[in-house]
Amino acid sequence: MTERLYYADSYAIQFSAKLVERLTYGDRPAVVLDRTCFYPTGGGQPHDLGRIAGVPVLDVVAREGDNAVVHVLMKALTVDEAVCEVDWARRFDHMQQHTGQHILTQAFVRVCGAGTVGFHLSADTVTIDLDQGGLSAAQIAAAEDLANQIVFEARSVTTRIVDPQAADGVRMRRLPDTLVTGGLRVVEVADFDVTACGGTHVRSTGEIGIIKVVKTEKRGDKLRVEFKCGGRALRDYRVKSDVLGQIAGALNAHFSEADVAVAKLQEDYRSAARSLKAAVSQLVEYEAASLISETALENGRRLIIRVYNQRDPAELKLLAQRLSAADGVVALLASAGDKAQLIFARSADRAEDMNVLLKRALTQLGDARGGGQPNIAQGGGVPADEAAIRRALEGAAMQRG
Ligand SMILES: [Zn+2]
């Protein structure tokens, strides 16, 4: 069985060890050492990275059955003894997040009696799942405050092995690593929390720097709390400060009033959109009247054919409706462009079938599709220029039947 050096000292990252087994794990070469500082994935905490005899370590797993720590490598090792080094930045990040989790978990117990039933730590996120789904923002803030008070007091964090039979008062979700350590390994934040845990932790809560809840999400009767500690909290703060600063700058507002400024901007936009719609409607009304007055009445019918370049389809439809509200009108309207739009409409006193006329015009435009009612029909969707569409509309209007 591998001697796990990180149990005694999570700050030790350089060590030498003997290779006791060479194997293949997945498709990769792997080794078991007689002793290791490498933490294998487990207890919600990801594995360490680093190098063994200069060869990058890709994965570290505890083997089922004998609990040997298997180091998966970029390439096979030929040496029998190796100098090894754990990637400290990654290790320390995990120590900050993991110790922060112990403290936040205990803070939720003390503030509102909420227990932690799940813990997940990945490269991007750290979460705990609480057994109370309905915590208020004030309760979450109170737990966050208590957790940070424990950080600011720079309390000692120690580990020891205890007899599992005498582990009253130790917070644990399951019995971890008893096989490996010959007892129950507990992690104690002085006068605050004692938890059974096999992970890596900082020695003083002050090293966590800060614990910040960034998001909560109700999941059934559970509450998922996402948080960031130390370096992660700093980077998160930096990004949010930058982005919020830019938003506030663009809004010409103080950052604390950016949300109010955005809400006002949204209301201004909605109001402007309403005004624009009303203005366009009025304009189309005038346009329709003008088109009707300039089109001669022939045998009781005003045939209005107009092709526009990339005109808004909604506006085109509005124009067709306005035109057909008058008597004796047959309006064949279109917008040219990458997706040509055709809309045909007639007055209630006309008998022409717009569906029939539209089909005739669409046939001339290739793959275009459409349909509608006898009094109004629309289609298009294919690229067509103004001249081609005009020919199609005039051709459809000329035919009888
Ligand atoms: Zn832990």
Image (cartoon, rainbow, N blue to C red):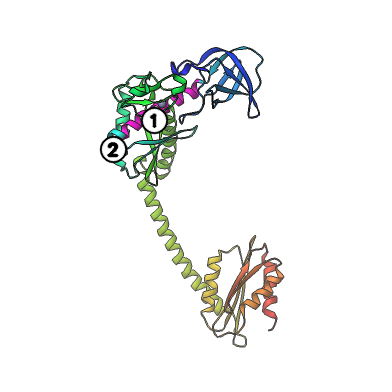
* Mark 2, secondary structure of its residue: helix
Q: Is mark 1 within 8 Å of ligand 1?
A: yes
Rendered image: mark on residue 112: 2
Q: Is residue 113 left or right of residue 396?
A: left
The relative height of residue 228 versus residue 13 in the rendered view (above or below) is below
Q: What is the x, y in percent for residue 135?
A: 32, 42
Q: Earlier in the sequence, mark 1 or mark 2?
A: 1
Outermost residue on the front side: it is 165
Q: What is the x, y in percent for residue 106?
A: 32, 31
Pointer 1 residue: 101
What crowding class fits label 1: few (fewer than 14 Cα within 10 Å), some (14-19), or many (20 or more)? many
Instruction: Indicate which quadrant contains ligand 1.
Output: top left
Q: How many marks?
A: 2
Tag 1: amino acid: Gln
For the C terminus, the image quarter is bottom right
Q: Is mark 2 within 8 Å of ligand 1?
A: no
